[in-house]
Image (cartoon, helix red, strand yellow):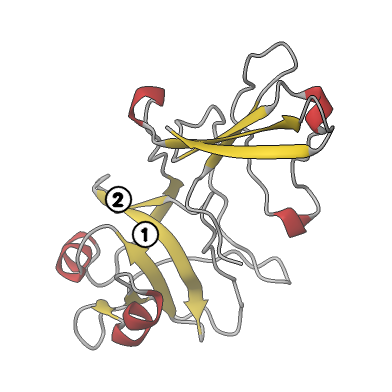
Amino acid sequence: MRASTFKDVLFSNADGSHSAAVEPLEDFYSGNAHIVNQNQTAGYVIFTQDLVSTIERNFEYPEDANGNVLSLVTDGSFGDACSEDLSLSSYYGKYTVNCYIQSTTPFGPFGSCRKVTGCDFFFSNDDGEGMHIYGVYDWARDGYELIIFPSGTVQELNSLFPDGSRINVDYYDAGKSVEDNLAMAHTFGKDGDHQTQVCHSITI
């Protein structure tokens, strides 16, 4: 099963209006998925590209199992800290960059953030200059490799974060206005004559 590229969903209410976007949108298998009985709706649900979030989120740096908090400081001891990871770029089909950070050993691991939703970040230096990051393959692989899916180039990253730079992390809201979102709607209900379930999709 392939994950949808639609980041937001709006369920209809019984009176025909639609709800606010479901936030956060949890994976089905997380145990926190938003499930609605179709009888409590007006017979449609809308999936959209990416709406502006209504939730203010403050980023908390990852911790390992022992509560040690990750510190992101670039390590350019052997040249530029960041370089393209050709293997992962080929595997994922999207630009992937490996940045050396000062070793976190013996702490870790610190995990990743690769989901379709909730993994947009803004990495900035202490001057406030930064870059939108589409996700994190690994926060600290082997204790010293930060692997990311950046919106810019290796050259730009190395300019922003030379050796010894602290990487400050915040969430990034790449959401679009309602008017600028593409969407797909599912309409559903029961056939009046045969009481059979019917479902149609409409692209907006």
Q: In which quadrant of the rendered image does the N terminus lie? A: bottom right
Above or below residue 150? Residue 188 is above
Q: In which quadrant of the rendered image does the C terminus lie? A: top left
Quadrant in which residue 8 is drawn: top right
Q: Secondary structure at mark 2?
A: loop
Q: Please give the name of the residue rendered at 83% of the width and 26% of the height, measured from the top-left corner.
A: 39
Find residue 41 and report its horizontal and vertical position in percent. Answer: 75, 24
Q: Please give the name of the residue rendered at 40% of the width and 74% of the height, measured from the top-left corner.
A: 147
Residue most toward the top? 15
Q: Please give the name of the residue rendered at 61% of the width and 79% of the height, measured from the top-left corner.
A: 107
Quadrant in which residue 68 is drawn: bottom right
Instruction: Count the marks.
Output: 2
Residue of label 1:
167
Find residue 58 and report its horizontal and vertical position in percent. Answer: 54, 41
Find residue 151 and report its horizontal and vertical position in percent. Answer: 27, 57
Q: How many other residues sit within 10 Å of disc 1, few (<14), some (14-19) or many (≥20)?
A: some
| Mark seen at residue 45 | none
Viewer-proximal residue among 150 and 31: 31
Cα gap from disc 1 to disc 2, whole angstroms:
8 Å
Q: Please give the name of the residue rendered at 31% of the width and 82% of the height, measured from the top-left corner.
A: 85
Left or right: residue 27 compared with residue 165: right
Q: Amino acid at mark 2?
A: Asp
Residue of label 2:
126
